[in-house]
Amino acid sequence: MQTVTLIPGDGIGPEITEAVVYILKAAGAQIEWDVQSAGADVIEIEGTPLPDRVIDSIKKNKVALKAPVTTPIGKGFRSVNVQLRKALDLYANLRPCKNIEGIKTKFNNVDLVIVRENTEDLYAGIERQIDEETAESIKIITKKASLRIAEFAFNYAVKNNRKTVHAVSKANICKLTDGLFLNCTREISQKYPQIEYKEILVDNLCMQLVQNPEKFDVLVLPNLYGDIVSDLCAGLIGGLGVAQGANIGLQAAVFEPVHGSAPDIKGQNKANPTALLLSAIEMLKYIGQNATAQKIENALFKTIKEEKVITPDLNGNALTIEFTKEIIKNLPL
């Protein structure tokens, strides 16, 4: 039995969390949940969206499953995701993007993996107000962080039979920061001669992805580019509702969907739990419960392929609970 920290989040988070927990239980996953609330809903009670107890729980259990947490735009508290990654040094953000049969998209040959550096760059949120008319955000790229994310990307490629790693940057403009990132990826690439190493500018990458996504295998990117490109790639496979993610460090791993908390559909029982479920499947593999993970994945893919009971974002009309029950019905005996 594995104890896992469970963060239901806010917005649609609690609804999709309930669905995923229900499915994992039905599939026989050997998990005991340590439930920890975080996000906008706990500020009034505890004065912070990320109480120390949440961090302490993850440090103790080493593994967490996290539903989305609302981050205010342009005001309010700092992103809980950013705080978690900093506090636990979850330096690698892993986002596989692969077509799922039954989800109609413009491309049917997408199978790539985004490896995003998770701790620095502009996304770290180091900002200051210079005067009433000027604000400044600091882009920090370090050799240490760049080397280890490159190592993670190439190591992942080897372990998962991938052929190519593209390093993504804007080094023609950000010559020092992105230039340092590229120098580090080049250095690490020398240790992996079996993996083809390529470089591409992030703007060219975005154009190429919406024309020929099959050209790409593993992408390794600094933090901000990684965040943007991962959402673009989610669009290639059907949207954020089917996009999984994991944040991995040396001492802990947090598995979460790519999408946000979607407060506009909160409480309507029509949210798609697929992204959180795929993240939970990856979590099960991470903790060694591979057979259960495969069982759930087969049931999920069968449900989507049949197109009989699917949620509105997949052009269906099923409620969250109906979709959940259909997945459970499709679990192998």
Image: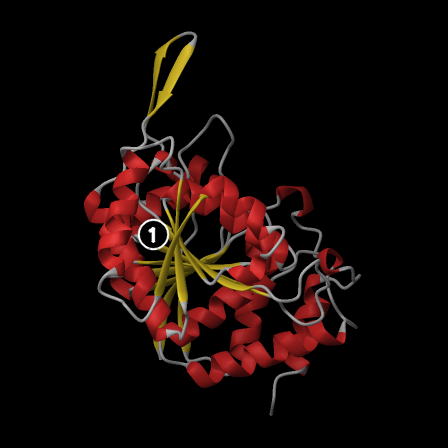
Count numbered badges in the picture: 1
Q: Position of residue 139 (x, y in %)?
A: 32, 31
Residue at point 70%, 56% (across, down): 269
| Residue hosting label 1 | 54
Q: Is residue 59 left or right of residue 195?
A: left
The outermost residue toward the top is: 132
Quarter of the image that includes the C terminus: bottom right
Residue at point 39%, 60% (across, down): 165
User: 192 or 32: nearer the eye?
Assistant: 192
**In the figure, residue 62 lies in which quadrant?**
bottom left
Looking at the picture, does residue 305 appear above or below residue 124?
A: below
Residue 59 in view (yes/no): no
Looking at the picture, does residue 33 appear above or below residue 185?
A: below
User: 292 or 239: nearer the eye?
Assistant: 239
Task: Name the residue type under label 1.
Answer: Val
Quarter of the image that includes the N terminus: bottom left
